[in-house]
Amino acid sequence: MALTLNERDRRLDGVRAAMRRDDIDALIVVGTAGTGIPFNGNFAYLTGRTLFYASAAFYLPLDGEPVSFIPGENQFEDAKRAGWIEHLVLSRQPFADCCRHLAGAGRAPARIGVSSLAVLPSPALEEIRGAAPGAELGEAGPLILAMRDVKSEEEIAIARRAGEVADIGFFRSLEILGAGLTGFEWKAEAERVMTAAGADGGFNMLGVGRAGGDSDIFRGFVVPPTARAFEDGDLALLEISPRVEGYYSQIVRLVSLGAPEADIAAAHAACVAAKQKGIAALRLGARFDEVMAPIERGLAAAGLGAKSVATAHTIGLDLSETVINPRTPGEIAAGMVVTVHPMIELGEWRQLFTGETYAVGDSGCVCLNRSEDRIYVV
């Protein structure tokens, strides 16, 4: 990540302040190369680098030098180049070596926070207990995520660039989509232009099918593309989520190969209108339920229901960080980067969603994408 040492110190100092507040003596942070894993971005947040395979461990004492335990010589070299943790240990068994370090670090910590117990392998949990007998172990993922939700100016600058890269991928998609192109070919070309613009990864998915008929029905669920060729009359839902310097951005747009059916056009218009009501409520100090309520009212007025999944979520080092729904405690703060994409039920195992990403500042929220939210006909 192209972030400064001042940013590193801001993060480590902030997390240690939270550790003191919660009486935590040390943190063990799990890092993996996966997507959608709870609190996975916490590792990149504290070490300054994103893993590209396997799992690693990071040890942060309340006082003393932090240590990263990195598997593989190639990742070790990448950590020296791209990360900002000075004490690196090349390790075939990151968690075992982290525990050996913990056992030999002098006074055993009384309380250890783990990010995250949900993904820590069971043998590693037993190794921690053996290295620090009597220590109380607790979940520390939310402690770090609470800091991550409010981005610094350096992070916001990356988020803006990631939004630009997402637009590059989408506008190139409009240029190439048509009958005969396969899903594989769409993804290859969209990711080619985004990579050339600075993407270092991504989560780019496709929902495609026929608007009418009894087979190959458009259902609105985005999945990895296949060799299926686009046909005239198709609907294509594009979820474009490039990762730039470790940070994701996301846009979701509906493309129709020919004029869309009236029911799809009406559902999409209702989804966009409800989303705009939520964006209007995306203001400083608004509770999460105050952002969600106008979206749900707008959909209900159109005779539609919101799905009980992420209508909105913060986004950054993880594709989905804090999910914003009526039951999530919290409020909107300056520095948040939020993707808003209401998901609606269309019945018969069908859905639709559409949206984009916003940065929240002191004077309101700013859209990070240039593409209009409408049905694009090609």
Image (cartoon, rainbow, N blue to C red):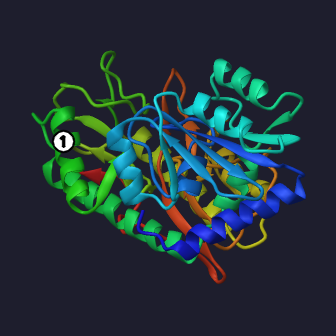
Q: Nearer the viewer, residue 362 or 373?
A: 362
As drawn, is 85 to the left or to the right of 26? left
As drawn, is 243 to the left or to the right of 280? left
The outermost residue toward the left is 180
The answer to whether residue 21 is seen in the rendering is yes
Residue at image position (77%, 42%) is: 113
The answer to whether residue 204 is seen in the rendering is no
Question: At label 1, which amino acid type do we have?
Answer: Ala
Picture coordinates of residue 332, whole percent (x, y) = 72, 65
Element carrying mark 1: helix
Q: Nearer the viewer, residue 62 or 235?
A: 62
Above or below residue 297? Residue 37 is above
Residue at image position (82%, 37%) is: 138
Q: Nearer the viewer, residue 102 or 300?
A: 102
Residue at image position (12%, 36%) is: 181
Above or below residue 113? Residue 5 is below
Picture coordinates of residue 328, whole percent (x, y) = 78, 47
As drawn, is 373 to the left or to the right of 284? left
The outermost residue toward the top is 214
Crowding at dot 1, Cα within 10 Å, few <14 / some 14-19 / many 20+, comes out as few
Residue 227: quarter of image: top left
Q: Which residue is mark 1?
A: 188
Above or below residue 195? Residue 345 is above
Residue at image position (14%, 49%) is: 176
Picture coordinates of residue 266, whole percent (x, y) = 46, 46
Picture coordinates of residue 233, whole percent (x, y) = 22, 35
* Total count of labels: 1
Quadrant showing the N terminus: bottom left
